[in-house]
Image (tube, grey):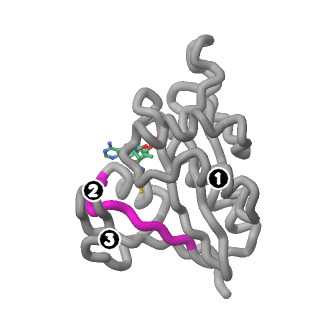
Amino acid sequence: MESRAGEILITRMTEHDLLEVVEIEEGSGLSRWGWAAYYAELQGVNRDLMLIARVASAPIIEHQRIAGYIVARESAGELHINNVAVRDQYRRRGVGSALLTRIVEAARRLKVQVAFLEVRSGNLAAQALYEKIGFKAIARRPDYYSDPREDAVVMSLTLGEP
Ligand SMILES: CC(C)(COP(=O)(O)OP(=O)(O)OC[C@H]1O[C@@H](n2cnc3c(N)ncnc32)[C@H](O)[C@@H]1OP(=O)(O)O)[C@@H](O)C(=O)NCCC(=O)NCCS
């Protein structure tokens, strides 16, 4: 897939990626999972739904850096997207879209029928990204988040017929 800045390479996450993944998580204002939770997730049945992105044309010194990642779970025909984040300096280059598109493709291969996610009501950047992929807001969960307290918007994307 071509980004505006070059080629976006998406691969499965491995335990070697976790220090960077946690660094990106900490810089992104996401609810904290931390190293141990990602490591445990990598040992589980959803490890194929943990992806990282690199931007191939990044300057040589940054070439190996992970630009962003996504973590999802599949259960009973539903995909739940838990975390998606892109390093500040790689945003607005299509990395988030590429990660979401790839996870949706993986879900289709697993015969998943519907994908869900929750997003902070004030996180308009993420909501715009999800809408671009085709997600629609279906519900609001009052005070779902803490630190700071905020509503969640629940969004869903139908992938296939039962
Ligand atoms: C949300 C996030 C993952 C988007 O990643 P990204 O790589 O910048 O996204 P893309 O470049 O693929 O953007 C795709 C579209 O999303 C929308 N979008 C992305 N960032 C936006 C912003 N800051 N403001 C408005 N719209 C935005 C735009 O429609 C954009 O398309 P365009 O660039 O052609 O206008 C990134 O901003 C991020 O890591 N945020 C912090 C973590 C976070 O909030 N994660 C989601 C938690 S639910």
Using residue 119 as the reference point, say whether residue 79 is left or right of it: right
Check if residue 117 falls in the magenta segment.
yes
Task: Please give the name of the residue rendered at 63% of the width and 42% of the height, measured from the top-left corner.
Answer: 52
Which is more toward the observer, 115 or 30? 30
Task: Please give the name of the residue rendered at 51% of the width and 54% of the height, measured from the top-left corner.
Answer: 83
Find residue 92 and report its image quarter: top left
Main SS of the magenta part reads strand
Check if residue 116 falls in the magenta segment.
yes
Which is more toward the observer, 84 or 132? 84
Which type of secondary structure does the marked residue at label 3 adopt?
Answer: strand
Amino acid carrying mark 2 in the image = Asp
Q: How far apart are marks 1 and 2 (CA)?
A: 31 Å
Amino acid carrying mark 3 in the image = Tyr
Front of the two marks 3 and 1: 3
- Disc 1 CB within 8 Å of nearest ligand 1 atom: no
Using residue 2 as the reference point, say whether residue 45 is left or right of it: right
Q: Distance between the residues labelled 3 and 2?
A: 10 Å
Disc number placed over residue 102 in the picture, else none? 1
Task: Please tell me whether residue 65 is drawn above or below residue 145 in the rendered image.
Answer: above
Mark 3 and mark 1 in contact? Answer it, CB < 8 Å: no
Circle 2 is placed at which residue position? 147
Amino acid carrying mark 1 in the image = Arg
Circle 3 is placed at which residue position? 144
Q: Earlier in the sequence, mark 3 or mark 1?
A: 1
Which type of secondary structure does the marked residue at label 2 adopt?
Answer: loop
Task: Please tell me whether residue 94 is drawn above or below residue 160 in the rendered image.
Answer: above
Q: Which stretch appears magenta?
A: 115-124
Which is more toward the observer, 27 or 128? 27
* Position of the C terminus by quadrant: bottom right
